[in-house]
Structure formats: structure tokens, C-alpha cells
Image: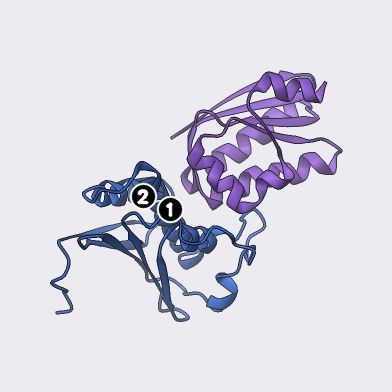
Chain colours: A purple, B blue
Amino acid sequence: MLVMDFELKQETLIVRPSGELDLGAADYFRSAVEEALRIHNARNLLYNLNKLSFVDSTGLGVILGRYRKITKNGGKVYIVSPQPQVRKILEISGLLRIMEEFPSENEALAKIG
Amino acid sequence: MRRKKRYSNEMKLEFLSVPSNVAFARVAVAAFASQLDFTLAELEEIKVAVSEAVSNSIVHGYGNATNRFVKIHAALTADSVEIRVEDGGKGIENVDAALQPAFSTDADRLGLGFVFMQSFMDSLDVKTAPDQGTVVTMVKKLGAGMARTNPEQ
């Protein structure tokens, strides 16, 4: 079960997924983020993962899919406060090497400026 | 009969190849494994490994067909859980390639499934043949920590 929350700040779409991101939720995640990006015409993407309790390689795939699209247009993708088990997955996969991580949304937005 | 006496407990699951059953499978196996004294972090690792194996069966084995069955057999010894995930799908043509990081036949998928299974479990065995399905067998030992964390070696 996955619930998504969106907010636009400083040309940055804040995505707050709550629950579990796997094969059962991947299509929903992908289309919800795509639609929010289209509506808000956002430049950057910020994933606040503090309520994401589970992710696997399928979930990482849809996160990375949006990364490619954003960076192609000169934007950046940020990760905020992943839970330990999710962070471990991000780390092993190498995603934390391409997406900057922040402890809070405010600190990430301050960096974006 | 290939039932092995060394198991202190066993369970079998069989469920349709629908995406929502990925969560069902990992939660069920983790609940079963929690009869041993695994840490919460270890149970999370088991969940990821099961999630990967079942997702592979649905997406690759059955090509996202939702009317097939995935089978799981899980067994406990005194200090380990052995998990077998089995499908009757098309099999993996090149197992060695599939075991490498970033090998994926699908653009939005990372090809990290087997990397996570290898990272989070203490052993991983894949038996497969074209059109004869795939059997993934993995073992997680109590208190062994994370076996291999670096997929880039």
C-alpha cells in the first residue's frame, strides 16, 4: 500500500511517498509523479522518504526513471531522510552517489536556493 | 520423499502472479522466519530478497501474466531459514548475466534484483532452464550480518 503526497516549493516538486514501493505500487508511483511533474512544471525533484517503509529494485527503478528525465532538463533530484532499511538499499544500488541526500526538506531547499 | 528431517518447521505458499502478491509473499515469509531470533534489520533483508525473487517470477518468468502461480517453500533449521521461490515460467536464458549488477531486459528496471538477493542472504542458488521455469533457493543464517555489501567487486 502506497500513498503519495505532493507539494511544489522553489520550482521543486516534493514527493512524499508513504508505505511500500514495490512491483505492486510501481505503476501508481510512476504515473502519479509523472502527472505531478506535468501539472507543476517542476525543475527539480525532492523525494522525502521518511515515511517509505520498504523499497526493492523495482521501486528503485521507478525512482531512477524520473531521475533520468529531470537531469536531462538540467534539474536535480534530492533524497531526504530515508529510513535505515531503505537507505541501505539506496546505498548498495549506488543511487546515493547520484542523488544528494539531506536530513530535512528545509536543508535541501536551502541548498537549492 | 525429499523431506529433510533437519527442518524444525516448514511452510508452503502458492499464489497468483499478480503484483499485489509480492507484498503478501514477503510479509508472510518474514513472519514465518521471525520464529527464529532474527533482528528487525535481518527480517527487512529477508523481505527484500523475497520481494526480488517473486517480482522476477512475475515480470520475467511469466512476462507479467497474472494467471500463473508462484510457489514458495520456506523451512527453518535451528539457526537459519531456507527460502525457495519457484515459477513455471520461461526461465532465464543466461543466468551468469542475470547475476551481474545492472543487467536488465527492461528499461525502467535496474537489474539489481539478484544483487540484493546476494547481498542480503548468505547463499543463493538459481536453477533454471528455458521454458521450464526458475527455482531460486536462498538461505539466511542467524546473526551472520550482511554477507556481501558491494555489488561492484
Residue at the image position 44 percent from the left and 51 percent from the top: B48
Instruction: Tell me whether the residue at label 1 lies in contact with that at label 2, contact meaning CB atoms closer than 8 angstroms.
Output: yes
Query: Residue A43, located in which quarter of the rendered image?
Result: top right
x, y percent for residue B32: 24, 50
Which amino acid does the dot numbered 2 rest on?
Arg
Residues under labels 1 and 2: Cα distance?
Answer: 6 Å
x, y percent for residue B128: 43, 78
x, y percent for residue B64: 49, 58
Q: Can residue B18 be seen in this view?
A: no
Circle count: 2
Which amino acid does the dot numbered 1 rest on?
Ser
Residue at the image position 37 percent from the left and 62 percent from the top: B68
Could you classify mark 2 by the number of other residues whose Cα lies within 10 Å: few (under 14), some (14-19), or many (20 or more)? many
Left or right: residue B97 compared with residue A1: right
Residue occupied by mark 2? B26
Query: Mark 2 falls within which chain?
Result: B
Residue at the image position 60 percent from the left and 69 percent from the top: B100
Could you classify mark 1 by the number of other residues whose Cα lies within 10 Å: few (under 14), some (14-19), or many (20 or more)? many
Tag 2, which secondary structure? Answer: helix
Residue occupied by mark 1? B51
Tag 1, which secondary structure? Answer: helix
Q: Can residue A28 be seen in this view?
A: yes
Query: Mark 1 falls within which chain?
Result: B
Q: In which quarter of the image is the C terminus of chain A?
A: top right
x, y percent for residue A37: 72, 30
